[in-house]
Image (cartoon, rainbow, N blue to C red):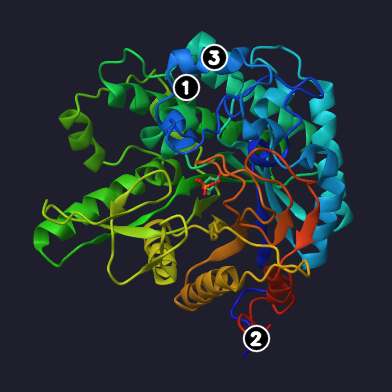
Amino acid sequence: MPSLFPKDFLWGGAVAANQVEGAFNEGGKGLSTADVVKYCPPGERNSLEQLLSMSRAELYEAIADNGDGNYPKRRGIGFYHRYKEDIALFAEMGFKVFRLSISWPRIFPTGEETEPNEEGLRFYDEVFDELRKYNMEPLVTISHYEMPVHLVTKYNGWASRELVELFLRYADTVFTRYKDKVKYWLTFNEINCTLKAPFLGAGIIMDGVENEKQVAFQALHHQFVASALAVKRGREINPEFSIGCMLARKLLYPYSCRPEDVLQAQAENQMAQFCSDVQVRGYYPSYIQRHLKKHGVSIEMLPGDVEILQENLVDFLSFSYYMSSAVSTDNSITATTAGNLSTGLANPYLQTSDWGWQIDPIGLRVVLKEMHDRYQIPLFVVENGLGAADEVAEDGSIRDDYRIDYLAQHIAQMAEAIEDGVELMGYTSWGCIDLISASTSEMRKRYGYIYVDQDDEGGGTLARLRKKSFYWYKQVIATNGAELYNS
Ligand code: BGP
């Protein structure tokens, strides 16, 4: 069968600095919000709970901890020292693009310096040069779930408007430094997660806060303004830049065809697209007003904010898609499913992953079509994948057929969506090399084509091994998505 993907389709994989680099106190890097999230054995307050609502006491305890606790994102998978080996493996698969993030505290250790940390800048210079060597485009997320922890202790993160200026100093620095090395940029990873997980998305401690929604929406407004101003600045620095926004897009189905369920699903899907409505269309959509009023939220805007949002729209819309779930107004329906930072009602027609996330490839096509209809701008799937507990067989092989199935089915639906008329720029599957889980801080939850020998406690040799999916993805890329099943 001929390929349905455009000739210049950007195939690749994605990671985030805080989940791979390690070297948390090397090269002049400051402590980040990811470095203070602890891995706790079952039964204790887990990483996800910390990310959803980090307390001040917990934060200070972690800052003071110089080595007793298990903070997996401090060690990552050693990418800081092994990036050449890892990039060579991506090149072997034929990656056209590699999505990575820059660690803000590697460039501005506390976030408040007036001069950047040259050693940090040099590290990314070397990484980008290495990618260029293999003709791989970097796709760079400027802020992916981390910031200098100092900005939390001093300002309570994005709750404060001060962060806008500090972020712009950082964005300006990396745009200027890498203007000839990087073309594709994303401002904030999964920006809508600020509402669900304020510590993870925006470095906010909610201790003592009366109306958490008020603080979260205000923080989000600061991020919208910062993102729009970064788009503006980026275009001034290099008009060839292509700058996108990034959403966590979980599809929500009505549990039944009861009109109440349909309405509820519509409302929740609107909320899931609220951030892209602002960043792609350039204004707060009218439906959000009722929501804000209901929750007693009033967003403080400075003169000029409306114009800033209006005049600096993103070039493309990128998103993560892992799963779907269902919603209902009927309280007697109680079977739930786990999910990407949130739970929902289980859909009886779908299977689940080892971590209880429901697998729904057709949902990806639904989302792609819906977003295309709504925005008419290029789309980019920058995260998708299956977290699973892979086993290394005695002969050293890792037969992750379940992952191949998951990915093949999702890619097949992307091809269908392209046939449906969707403009899709590329696909970077999540965690192309095993990394520390964003939500659970586990190593055991693996997404990669490349296995990394490390356990949840940090034991292991860090050796890299090619899984079965490695060879499969190589073939997918080589055939531009035409051969998905017969590896
Ligand atoms: C997204 C994040 C990633 C990531 C992925 C998988 O929300 O942008 O950083 O890790 O989800 O999630 P997890 O690691 O929790 O399985």
Q: Counting other residues with Cα less than 10 Å from the Cα at mark 2, is it few (<14), some (14-19), or many (20 or more)?
A: few
Q: Which residue is mark 3?
A: 61
Q: Nearer the viewer, mark 1 or mark 2?
A: 2
x and y percent of residue 202 in the render? 47, 27
Residue at horizontal 35 percent and vertical 69 percent from the top: 350
Q: Label 3's element?
A: helix
Q: Nearer the viewer, mark 1 or mark 3?
A: 3
The furthest residue to the bottom:
1
Check contact, mark 3 vs mark 2: CB within 8 A.
no
x and y percent of residue 414 in the render? 51, 71
Q: Which residue is mark 2?
A: 486
Query: Could you tell me if residue 355 is visible in this image?
Result: yes
Q: Which residue is mark 1?
A: 158
**As rendered, which of 471 and 113 lies closer to the eye?**
471
Q: Earlier in the sequence, mark 3 or mark 2?
A: 3
Q: CA distance from mark 1 to mark 3?
A: 22 Å
Residue at horizontal 53 percent and vertical 18 percent from the top: 163
Q: CA distance from mark 3 to mark 2?
A: 52 Å
Q: Answer yes or no: disc 3 within 8 Å of ligand 1.
A: no
Q: Earlier in the sequence, mark 1 or mark 2?
A: 1
**As rendered, which of 195 and 449 lies closer to the eye?**
449
Q: Amino acid at mark 3?
A: Glu
Quadrant containing the N terminus is bottom right
Q: Answer yes or no: disc 1 within 8 Å of ligand 1.
A: no
Q: Amino acid at mark 2?
A: Asn
Q: Amino acid at mark 1?
A: Trp
